Amino acid sequence: MAEALVSVTINGRRHALWGEETEVLLTVLRDRLGLTGTKNGCEVGHCGACAVWVDGLPQLACLTLLGSVADRTVTTVEGLAGWWRTLNGNDAYHPLQTAFVDNGAVQCGFCTPGMLMAGAALVRDRPGATAEAVRESLAGHLCRCTGYEQIVRAVLDVAAREEDPA
Amino acid sequence: MSSTAWLRPRTAAEVTMALGLPGARILAGGTDLVPNRTWELDTGTTWVGIGAVPGTREVRCDAAGRWEVGAAVTLAEVLAHPQLGRHYPLWMEAMRAVATPEIRTQATVGGNLCVDTRCRFRNQPPIWRSGLIPCFKSGGDRCYAAPASRLCVAMLVSDSAPVLMAMGAEAAVAGPFARWIALADLYSGDGDRHLTLNPGEWVRAIRLPAKPPLGAFRKWRPRATMDFPEVDVAVSVDCDEEPRVVRIVVSAVGPVPVRATSAETLLESGPWTSERLAEAADRARAAVHPYDNGQLRVWGRQRAVHGLVLDALRQVASAVVEKGAQA
Amino acid sequence: MTVPTAERITAPATRLAGPRIDAWAKVTGQALYADDIRWPNLAYGVLLRSPHAHARIVSMDLEPARRMPGVLAVLAGPGSVAPYGIMPSTQDEHALAVNKVVHVGEPVAAIAAETREAAAAAARAAAVQYAVIKPVLRPGPGKGQVEPVHPEHPQGNLFKQVDLEFGEVEAAFFDSWVREDSFFYQGNNHGAMEPHAAVAYWTPDGQVEIVTSTQTPHYVQRELSRALGIPAYKIRVRASVVGGGFGGKSEAFGHEVAAVLLSRACGRPVKITLTREEVFYTHRGRHPVSMRVRTAWNPAGELQAMDFRSELDGGAYSSYGIATTYYTGALQPVTYRIPAYRFHGERWYTTKPPCGPKRGHGTTQPRALVEIHLDRVARALGLDPLELRRRNLTPPHSITVNQLEVTTSGLAECLDAVEAMSDWRARRLQPEPNRGLGVACSAYLSGAGLPIYWNPLPHSGVRMAVNRDGGVQVFCGLTDIGQGADTVLAVLTAHALGLDPARIRVHTADTGSTPVDLGSYSSRVTMMAGHAVLMAAERMAALVTEAVAARQGVALGEVRREQEGFWGADGVIAWEQAVQWAEAAHGPLTTFGGYTPPPPIGRYKGSGVGPSPTYSFSACVADVSVDPVTGQVAVHRLWVAHDLGQPLHPSLVEGQVRGGVVMGLGEALMEEQAFNPDGRHRGPHFLGYRMPTILDVPPIEVALVGEPDPRGPLGAKEVGQGPLNPVIPAVLNAISAAAGVDLSETPATPDRILRALKTQPQRRTI
């Protein structure tokens, strides 16, 4: 009775998953679907490395139950570029991915997927966001390598461009 | 991992019934229950969601101007609400202080009020706990934080609880006998069973006063975000009443938020000179006895109470002056 | 005042050197960290770990675990056939404990199963009985102690004691002004975001394949060889993409040995991934150190002598402990000129997770005390703390009293830079209430002068191959742990061969296919692999140029480069063409490069720790406020200047500086690996062990100063560790200036500050 068939769209593809409704999304993504881009840094919501989008909002996959995403859409770092292409009809990567590469926002890269998902939601919802807003939105994401500055720079870079497409 | 059932009843009565199942727990946002299961702290076998019950996801204002917020409304929804922020800035401050943006997207109003108590001798990962003789909250007969105590002293870490208490908010309890209770009456004082709710009862909504008092909130923690409180202080004053109503609530120092009544009495009448504010802070500190079960050292937490209360009182005092000037 | 030679880093970092070569894989989720790896027929391993800090294993019944569903193999201790450990003289670890356990989380059994959950369930089913012994929680002879940590160790719990003395120490103290201070530096953890993980396969023909999150594949191979009792050539160690190291992944661990043994037992590849809790028990982080410093001064404010004592709490095993112990005394004379110097260090076993190397290895703790001490000296002598430091800097191109050879030093420029950037004088003249400035200096090695095990071989080797397709393949054992070592290798190759970086493909961190590089520790990679790759590239360039000269019938000196190719008699000769001529002449093009540091000049026991080809220098100024009511510290800004010689890749340099500074800030303000009286960690998770969030980090201004160092590759020195060291004392000195009280330990949490404010009289002047 605890198991159920859960239908969920992940990175644009529909999956029918049979399993425990209370299994966390993190293990579903990593262990069952092989979507290992979403990282497990602490497994209990203390680090932010496993952030994904659920219906476009950043959530921690280690705290999200499979049953709670039934009939909803999940986007992981693997699907970020695809989401962007569908939206813009081009073949580019998400501008935040490019900005992370160009701004030196990536070091060991383990926090990067979570940072990208939180940052991409921010630049989508709040074009022209201030540095303060960027920092607030990344407050739940630990990074041990960069000192954060280059990540803020990358997000601001894109937030400014999104505000003024010219 | 043992199997956990997840029920999503559609009426309040069904929730009450489901809570009668063995090992039943309310599943609200899951931001506390889920990691507690991951760490094998919570072994509940039936999770009862309440979000499908009518009203639990609603925010509305009654004829008397009191706002009622459903228990399953998320913290992010509260913070984004067009009206609530204007009416209840103090509550907003506490909400913003909770955890992180992602967690606030999931966590709920009811979940934050009822969130399980925490203790440095229990809220630890599995290997850490595996060799310990169980404490009260783990089904045993002792307390590591307070060896002389006959009750669990795990702390209430809800940031909204002290603030809502200071504001004079109420909680709607659903169950066999639905009722409204003052928020202070929600907490039992026993860290193990920290809510006063009877079997089958659950918090359906909260109700905020039409004219909230002026107030201030202080959350003391090591980092600027993410951490649970090591001490929370909420202070409010309602000068429209005579004598004025003062509430000083200190929380995250035990299983229940503490009202510093002696300090409140001092400030109910007479001028709020800096000496008397300091005296009130002294009294508040004397009323509070944190146990050594937080992350920061207990002597620091005890001492912080004084400073935080003083700080909060000063803020309220100047707000009162400002308001008087405007009037 | 302007910053003399500083190149201030401004946003965004220059892209001249191009982005990191692994950046795209990391932003698209393609990079494979060890736990992301899935080999066919993979099984999952879990370690059963001790819940006690100190206990005798009375009995162990693993039968119930064997009977659990999905279980493939169950192993009891010791697992390893011989004790292993990173330092050849102090090998004291087994993969699985046998008779007793000496820290919470020590592995006692290993289980492989079809899934991780099944293995974990089996671990819970195993029945181990312990007889608990009183834990040993403090260094020192220990009163009332029931049993030493390692009863067979001849000196009780004393792991190592070292004494060094240079110059006329007693004489200097005899007729000088003397001050003494002591300090306790709390231990802390690396907190790499990626927990350790390893995938291992014992192949049917008896070879070992292991992919692991490590900084040192070569040392892991050596240690596995010893632990498994098989020749090293049968073991191929590869580093996965590593999600941060900081010293925490620089030796072999029980889970790596266990993964191999479980694989042998069940005939399938086995993966073990640590939980965050297990990472805190695996540890090897910063040692807690109690320190005392005594210094002698002449009336001109010049340091005459220093007597430094350190007592390290080593935890349960040796790890790098000998080196750490020496490092707490080695670099004091590199920063400041000390005519006479005495050092006494001791490291003790305790029943806590073993300490080891963390960014700044052993130099961070003494640096904190020395710099705090200097501020107090300056206060007593009535000198500006910056001025006192200036009067005592170790001069460039000099030899220290402990026989370390300093080449270039930009420390004076570092001080000038942070003074100018912070507007030091103006701010100090007009202090705001409860607000203060603090300064500190530091020095760090650019690669350890000696390897972990004695040998006369190169510390880094590079094999370079150029194929007829015009691409360049670089093979080197170095390991990119996030700092960008692979990128540096590619950038240097492209630079040396005059090629587009897109032609370069690097193959690293694989003992099965790359020449040895000792690993990513001691800030040695750019220095040593850098030299090695430049040598290989120079030889490759010569081969190709010679072929061009021969074909064109011109003298070697007349061959001219044009873009990627060469000028020829009939126009431009493409690189590909030149390469094919060279291959026709010489056969497949392969060259080698290697690097061995200059021999240390010291000849005393202990002189092996501290020498380096060259040293980096740093200075930091912190501006903080302390709230006297809540004890909370607000760091408004940090200014950091670092001398790394010639920067090779500005964006990587910036990442190293900022990351190190923020890690230092965490150590100063919040991070502590502390334990309860029963030996349990106060919080082996990221709420109990608090690292700075983005909201805890103030604006940080960075200046790079200095000149190219003759010993660095293209003049470069290190940047990975140095910038961390001055931050902690700068922040602590600023807190002292702001609050008017002195702290006697780290971290400066609000509870400790409230206690200091309560127990100490507050100074009123700066």
Image (tube, grey):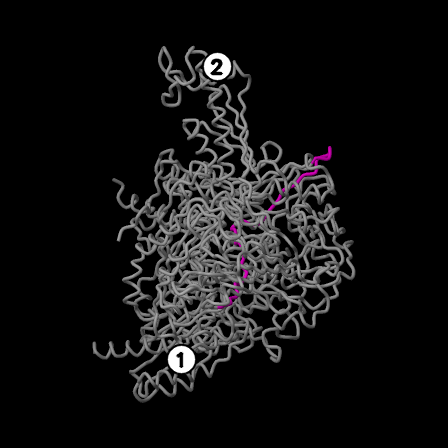
Q: Where does the N terminus of chain B fall, quadrant-wise? A: bottom right
C189 falls in the magenta region: yes
Please provide percent x and percent y for residue B90. 35, 70
In this view of the protein, can residue A32 be seen by the observer? no
- Which residue is tagged 1? B248
Q: Disc 2 is attached to a residue of which chain?
A: C
B277 falls in the magenta region: no
Q: Secondary structure at mark 1?
A: strand
Under mark 1, the amino acid is: Ile
Number of other residues with Cα within 10 Å of mark 1, as a class: few under 14, some 14 to 19, many 20 or more: many
Along the line of sight, the residue nearer the viewer: C174 or C536: C174
The relative height of residue B289 versus residue C691 in the rendered view (above or below) is below
Please provide percent x and percent y for residue C269. 67, 40
- Furthest-left residue in view? B326
Q: Residue at x 64, y 61 (%)?
A: C348
Residue C379 image-quadrant placement = bottom left
Bounds of the magenta span? C180-207
Q: Residue at x 70, y 61 (%)?
A: C155
Spatial CA distance of label 2 from label 1 is: 87 Å
Say the numbered circle drawn on residue C581.
2
Please provide percent x and percent y for residue B195. 52, 74
Q: Nearer the viewer, mark 2 or mark 1?
A: 2
Q: Is residue B11 left or right of residue B310?
A: right
